[in-house]
Image (tube, grey):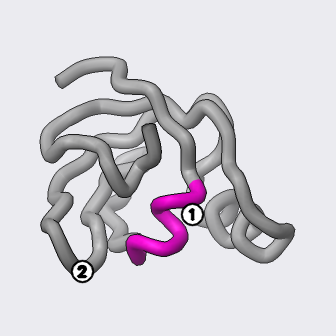
């Protein structure tokens, strides 16, 4: 499953990041890397996702969120 598909309120762990160097670097700077735990605060059908990473709340566009493969840790 990809972060863009994760249900609201779920806790997910990053399994891998699929994308070029730029996308990986941007995500890394936001604290999103393999093994990171992310809480999906809001995932509307359109528009950006709101997630919490390391205590920070950030908005991620659907395009970049679809490059982050995750597994659900807790719903």
The secondary structure type at the circle numbered 1 is: loop
* Percent x, y of residue 61: 41, 76
Q: Which one is nearer the viewer's eye here, 6 or 33?
A: 6
User: Which segment did they paint magenta?
Assistant: 61-67
Q: Which mark is residue 30?
A: 1
Q: Which one is nearer the viewer's eye here, 24 or 6?
A: 6
* Percent x, y of residue 43: 19, 59
Instruction: Say whether residue 20 is left or right of residue 59.
Output: right
Q: Nearer the viewer, mark 2 or mark 1?
A: 2
The Cα atoms of the two marked residues, 2 and 1, are separated by 19 Å
* Percent x, y of residue 55: 35, 49
Instruction: Say whether residue 69 is left or right of residue 72.
Output: right
Q: Which quadrant of the figure has residue 21?
A: bottom right
Q: Which quadrant of the figure has residue 28?
A: bottom right
Q: Is residue 4 magenta?
A: no
Q: Residue at x 47, y 62 (%)?
A: 65
Q: Residue at x 32, y 49 (%)?
A: 5
Q: Is residue 34 above or below residue 22?
A: above
- The tag earlier along the polypeptide, 2 or 1, is 1
> Residue tagged by mark 2?
47
Q: Quadrant of the C terminus?
A: top left
**Residue furthest toward the right?**
21
Q: Quadrant of the N terminus?
A: top left
């Amino acid at each position: 499953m990809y972060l863009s598909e994760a249900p609201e309120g779920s806790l997910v762990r990053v399994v891998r990041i699929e994308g070029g160097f730029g996308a990986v670097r941007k995500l890394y700077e936001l604290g999103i890397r393999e093994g990171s735990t992310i809480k999906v605060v809001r995932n509307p059908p359109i528009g950006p996702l709101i997630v919490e990473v390391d205590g920070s709340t950030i908005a991620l566009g659907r395009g970049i969120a679809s490059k982050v493969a995750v597994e659900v840790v807790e719903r």
